[in-house]
Image (cartoon, rainbow, N blue to C red):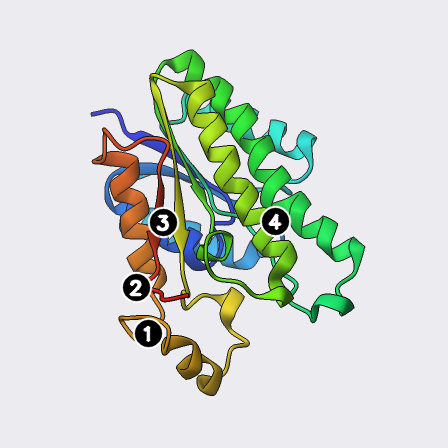
């Protein structure tokens, strides 16, 4: 039986790494995109290929650079001949006090999180459209909807833009390609590693489940939407444990 193929951006850690594991465990060939963390990406590739009977590639690519993205997508298409699912997960954040935030870092966050998602979606979306099937899942954040932190204004703006991009892309690729968005709340990932236990306890007071999510809990939802939720399209699915703010 021919395996499906998934391209996961930012797959060397956090939610992306968890996605790579769940897709590989379900007989997907996996492309692990990374930008800086080659050691982690290589280690994950070795783990997946030794555990599952699948093909795995770790591909370095700065998704905010169009030529990098084009080269990555060309490689995937030349080796695998198709892409069944794209998970736009790569993202960065530079949290600082609002008035300390520089224009340079604001632009960098937008470039990676939003522009990068657009670039990858453009090149992969064309492939999916030509195939006549496929799924795109964009990773946004509850920060884009109802969780406000001035220290994260650039990150929040980028994630709100991803929601808008999702809606427009869903319309552009209809009716054969499904495009959806997952908006996680607080998740135990390296991006949140600087939050200490006291801060975490305070943040959890506004979460009905009274805890952060694990990356695996988010990736299970992503896998479901990519594979089993065949009538979910153009949707923003919040996975935040019942956040009250």
The mark found on residue 35 in the picture is 4
State the CA–CA distance, disc 2 to disc 3.
Answer: 19 Å
Say whether residue 178 is left or right of residue 112: left
Nearest to the observer: residue 244 or residue 196: 244
SS for dot 3: helix
Mark 4 touches mark 1? (CB < 8 Å): no
Residue 108 visible from this viewpoint = yes
Q: Position of residue 140 (x, y in %)?
A: 47, 48
Mark 3 → mark 1, Cα distance in angstroms: 21 Å
Q: Which residue is mark 2?
A: 241
Q: Position of residue 244 (x, y in %)?
A: 36, 66
Q: CA distance from mark 4 to mark 2?
A: 30 Å
Between label 4 and label 1, give the one nearer the viewer: 1
Of the residues under marks 2 and 3, which one precedes in the sequence?
Answer: 3
Q: Which is more N-terminal, label 3 or label 4?
A: 3
| Residue under the image location 38 percent in, 18 percent down | 174
Q: Are discs 1 and 2 less than 8 Å apart at CB?
A: yes
How far is disc 4 from disc 1 in space, using C-alphas? 30 Å
**According to the image, label 3 marks what residue?**
19
Q: Residue at x 52, y 34 (%)?
A: 165
For mark 1, does the 10 Å Cα neighbourhood hold few (<14), some (14 to 19), or many (20 or more) residues? some
- The mark that comes first in sequence, 4 or 2, is 4
Disc 4 and disc 3: Cα gap in Å? 17 Å
Judging from the image, what secondary structure is the residue with disc 4 in?
loop
Cα separation, mark 1 vs mark 2, equals 8 Å
Neighbours of disc 4 within 10 Å: few (<14), some (14-19), many (20+) = some
Q: Name the N-terminal-most of marks 4 and 1.
A: 4
């Amino acid at each position: 039986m021919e395996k499906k193929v998934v391209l996961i951006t930012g797959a060397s850690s956090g939610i992306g790494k968890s996605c790579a594991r769940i897709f590989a465990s379900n007989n997907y060939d996996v492309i692990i995109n990374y930008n800086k963390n080659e050691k982690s990406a290589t280690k994950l590739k070795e783990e997946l290929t030794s555990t599952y009977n699948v093909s795995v590639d770790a591909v370095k690519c700065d998704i905010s650079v169009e030529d990098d993205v084009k080269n990555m997508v060309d490689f995937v298409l030349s080796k695998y001949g198709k892409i069944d699912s794209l998970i736009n997960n790569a993202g960065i954040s530079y949290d600082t006090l609002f008035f300390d935030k520089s224009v340079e870092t604001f632009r960098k966050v937008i470039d990676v999180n939003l522009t990068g998602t657009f670039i990858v979606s453009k090149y992969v979306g064309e492939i999916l459209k030509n195939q006549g099937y496929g799924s795109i899942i964009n990773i946004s954040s509850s920060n884009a909807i109802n969780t406000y932190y001035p220290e994260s204004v650039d990150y929040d703006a980028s994630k709100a833009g991803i929601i808008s991009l999702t809606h427009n892309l869903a319309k552009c690729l209809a009716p054969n390609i499904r495009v959806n968005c997952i908006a996680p709340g607080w998740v135990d990932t390296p991006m949140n590693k600087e939050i200490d236990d006291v801060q975490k306890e305070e943040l959890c007071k506004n979460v009905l489940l009274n805890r952060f999510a694990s990356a695996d809990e988010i990736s299970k939802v992503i896998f479901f939407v990519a594979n089993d939720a065949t009538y979910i399209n153009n949707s923003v699915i919040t996975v935040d444990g019942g956040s009250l703010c």
